[in-house]
Amino acid sequence: MRKFTTLNFDLARGDNFTIPLRFYNADGTYKDITGATIYFTAKTDPDLSEETASNITIDYTSHEDAENGLSNFTIDATNSDLFIEDQYHYNLRVVLTGGAKYTMFAGIITVPITSERRS
């Protein structure tokens, strides 16, 4: 499996943002992630519980090529519009069919103040 990585990034409200994910077995072959769920949680305060209503959560069960360990995690325009101008602590975890859990990414998302969008 992929090792945990810190990834900080900026996110403009109303934009799409994609993180390509590739999963590997210990021997370097692609890991079959059929049935896996990717969980994303973002919150303004890292001490808030996972169930706090102000958190932004996205769950994915559909993958680009599950048998070959390929998935694209996307915050689409509808979800990115839920963010307000602030900094968010986030984590991106995968839970495999057998129940194994791995944190793939964690870090800070900065949502800058932007002018009104025309489209």
Image (cartoon, rainbow, N blue to C red):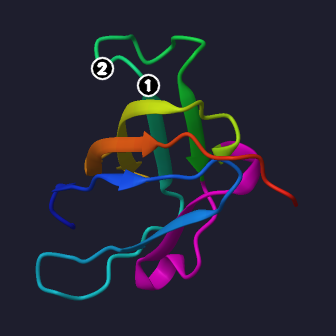
CA–CA distance in space, label 2 to label 1:
6 Å
Residue 56, horizontal then vertical, whole percent: 57, 30
Q: State which quarter of the image contains the N terminus.
A: bottom left
* Crowding at mark 1 (Cα within 10 Å: few <14, some 14-19, many 20+): many
Tell me: residue 1, above or below residue 105: below
Q: Amino acid at mark 2?
A: Pro
User: In the image, 46: left or right of 79?
Assistant: left
Magenta-colored stretch includes residue 50: no
Q: What residue sits right under mark 1 in the picture?
A: 43
* Crowding at mark 2 (Cα within 10 Å: few <14, some 14-19, many 20+): few
Q: Amino acid at mark 1?
A: Lys
Residue 84, horizontal then vertical, whole percent: 59, 30
Answer whether residue 96 is visible to the viewer in this image. no
Name the foreground residue: 42 vs 72.
Answer: 42
Q: Residue at x 64, y 62 (%)?
A: 16
Residue 41, horizontal then vertical, whole percent: 46, 34
Q: Residue at x 29, y 52 (%)?
A: 8
Secondary structure beneath dot 2 equals loop
Secondary structure beneath dot 1 equals strand
Q: What residue sits right under mark 2 in the picture?
A: 46
Name the foreground residue: 42 vs 96.
Answer: 42
What's the mark number on residue 76? none
Q: State which quarter of the image contains the C terminus.
A: bottom right
Marks 2 and 1 in Cβ contact (< 8 Å): yes
User: In the image, 39: left or right of 91?
Assistant: right
Answer whether residue 74 is visible to the viewer in this image. yes
User: In the image, 15: left or right of 56?
Assistant: right
Residue range (magenta): 61-79
Magenta-colored stretch includes residue 76: yes
Name the foreground residue: 24 vs 18.
Answer: 18
Q: Residue at x 53, y 67 (%)?
A: 18
